[in-house]
Amino acid sequence: MATIFRILGLCTAGAATIAASPANAHLATARVVTCDAGNCLLVQGVRASSDTVVRINDRVVEVEGGRSWQVRLPVATIQNWSAPFARTVQVSVANPVGSAERSDAVRLPVGLLGYNLELASLVVRAR
């Protein structure tokens, strides 16, 4: 009976280790900030080394930082690189020497790539 509990404990510890590993963590996050160009998308993430290449929607971007990196891109640039009404951007981190690459769909803030409609008037009626 004690052997079963030991095996069960080892399986639980192994599952917790796998669930907490960085490979299962999100590659990057994105949020809107103000910058010189107006509104920018700040994409932040972590990579294995500072030699790795970061791509957003299959375009190489120059990032600031070492293992913890960040890049600010004008919202207009993100609109040009993405499909209309897109909800995510594809962020990839690749080692230039080897073929190891990690890729993740990073969620955009709600409505970032939507389009504003100019209403001439809005009629509201009470019933």
Image (cartoon, rainbow, N blue to C red):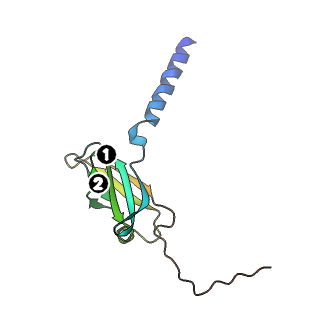
Tally of numbered discs: 2
Residue at position x 38%, y 48% in the image:
27
- For the residues bearing labels 2 and 1, Cβ distance under 8 angstroms: yes
Residue 113 position (above or below residue 98):
below
Give the quarter of the figure containing the C terminus: bottom right
Q: Which of the pair 6/28 is nearer the observer?
A: 28
- Quadrant in the rendering for residue 41: bottom left
Residue at position x 55%, y 17% in the image:
5
Pointer 2: what residue? 54
Give the quarter of the figure containing the N terminus: top right
Position of residue 26 measured from the top left corner of the image (x, y, whole percent): 42, 47
Q: Classify mark 1: helix, strand or loop.
A: loop
Residue at position x 26%, y 60% in the image:
60
Three-letter amino acid code at disc 1? Arg
Residue 119 position (above or below residue 96):
below
Q: Classify mark 2: helix, strand or loop.
A: strand
Question: Which sits earlier in the primary sequence, circle 2 or circle 1?
Answer: 1
Pointer 1: what residue? 47
Position of residue 22 measured from the top left corner of the image (x, y, whole percent): 39, 39
**Is 118 positioned to the left or the right of 40 in the image?**
right
Q: Which of the pair 50/96 is nearer the observer?
A: 50
Q: CA distance from mark 2 to mark 1?
A: 9 Å
**How packed is label 2: few (under 14 Cα within 10 Å), some, or many (20 or more)?**
many
